[in-house]
Image: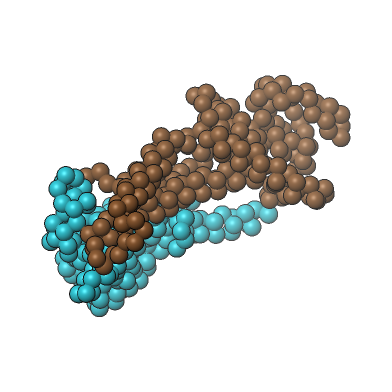
Chain colours: A brown, B cyan
Amino acid sequence: MPMYGDQGNKLVQHAKRMQNLAHLPPYQTELVRAVTREVRDLDKDVASLLEPFQGSFDPSADQSTACTLLVNHLSMRRNKRCLLAYHRTRTDKLEELVWNGSDVLDLAGQQAGGGANGATAAADSGASSSSLSPQEEDYVRQYGDLLAAYKGQWTDIDLTGSLEPPRDLFIDVRVLKDAGEIQTEYGAINLTKNSQFYVRQGDVERLIAQGYLQKLG
Amino acid sequence: MSYYDIDAILTDAEKIPCTFQLDIPDLGYLDNTPNQPLKAGTKVSLPLWLAEMLVIANTGGPDNKTFVTFDLPRALGNDVVQALKADPRAVPLRDQSAHFYGLATHMMDLSEEQELGSVLRKTFVTRAAEISLHARKVGGVSAKGKGKEEGSNLGIGGAGEEFLRGLDEWERKLFRKAHDGAKSGKEWMESIKKN
């Protein structure tokens, strides 16, 4: 029995599954559209139900209409909650990815997995379409800007740096993707794919988080 | 429980048996007959998010009726309650409802069932002890959070696996927390020894 709210429920089930994933699955454009369409249809129904009453509807005089209106109203409210919860779950995830320093927009383009360990990102590049909606891409960009501005207040501490105290000052890394030339205290290094370097951990931490480099050993 | 809580929203999708108290021409679709009016006395399964308000809302008429009346869903029926009284650990709650406790809490808000609360409290306490017992048997190698699907990692027998499969969502969370806690504790102890 297809019923109002069923589509919204599907959306929330997507959100539920998403909670246990490391990456962000594709945005459910079709479902979101279906749910909003349902809300619009319900709103139209309500308007046409109320039309003959000319603004003077008395619920106790017409109980069956009152009940229909209540059911329609509750269905709209339910759909609204499903929509908001779905998007909120996604933005929570996006914020987490931004804080982890993974290049979300880049990741999205590759449909790749792994927020915290972006190292696998290069491994499974697949479909070309983004798993983010255009609005979400915007959100990530602006949230990233906000975070950067916030971090800018403290120049001597990296808020998104690793919380693990490093065991060694220098580490071996392998380059997974060409990252161009970077400047370090000891001069410039050219990071070309498949090469290996012995570098200061602090210099490359962000590149590791973004999946350009892989820590060895 | 927050507005955005995914589990709360899914709990609200659980259905309970309701009976309509008046004829409603436009709601035939709820009984799968979109072109006919919904007759008073029709029994329909409605999701909680809809039923809850319809049960409470007053029709506004002189007789103070509500739009629908409801019965306890089968998950909280007499059979289940009796089985829980006998041995809470022997009932796979998940087969009754994936959100068993959530559903039960809602139903207790709506109905005047006196006994249900104490039966459920005893059920949870008894089962929680059992859950923590299983969760502490950490193999150490099991994948985070997924531990319970891999019985071998937990070193538990078939009976334990059977029990864990019957946990509802809330109990699963409890298991995961207990499991992760025990695991992190163990890891920390080991890292202390190393240094």
Q: Nearer the viewer, residue B88 or A50?
A: A50
Depth check: give the residue in front, B195 or A92. A92
Q: Is residue A152 left or right of residue A217?
A: right
Q: Residue at x 60, y 46 (%)?
A: A95
Residue at the image point whose x is 40% and y is 58% from the top: B8
Work out which quarter of the rendered image holds the N terminus of chain A and state it.
top left
Q: From where the camera sits, is residue B186 visible?
A: no
Quadrant where the C terminus of chain A is found in the figure: top right
Provide residue A194's location: percent of width, then percent of height.
Answer: 67, 22
Using the image as rendered, state which of residue B28 and residue B2 is in the foreground. B28
Q: Residue furthest bottom?
A: B114
Q: Is residue B182 left or right of residue B45?
A: right
Tell me: B21 left or right of A93.
Answer: left
Q: Nearer the viewer, residue A41 or B68?
A: A41
Residue B163: where, in percent of width, then height? Answer: 29, 57
Residue A127 placed where, x, y %?
49, 24
Specify the farthest residue to the right.
A186
Q: For residue B130, what is the image quadrant?
A: bottom left
Q: How many marks?
A: 0
- Left or right of B60 in this view: A203: right
Residue at the spot x=31%, y=57% of the render? A53
Residue A169 visible? The answer is yes
**What residue is shown at x 21% (from left), y 64% (from top)?**
B68
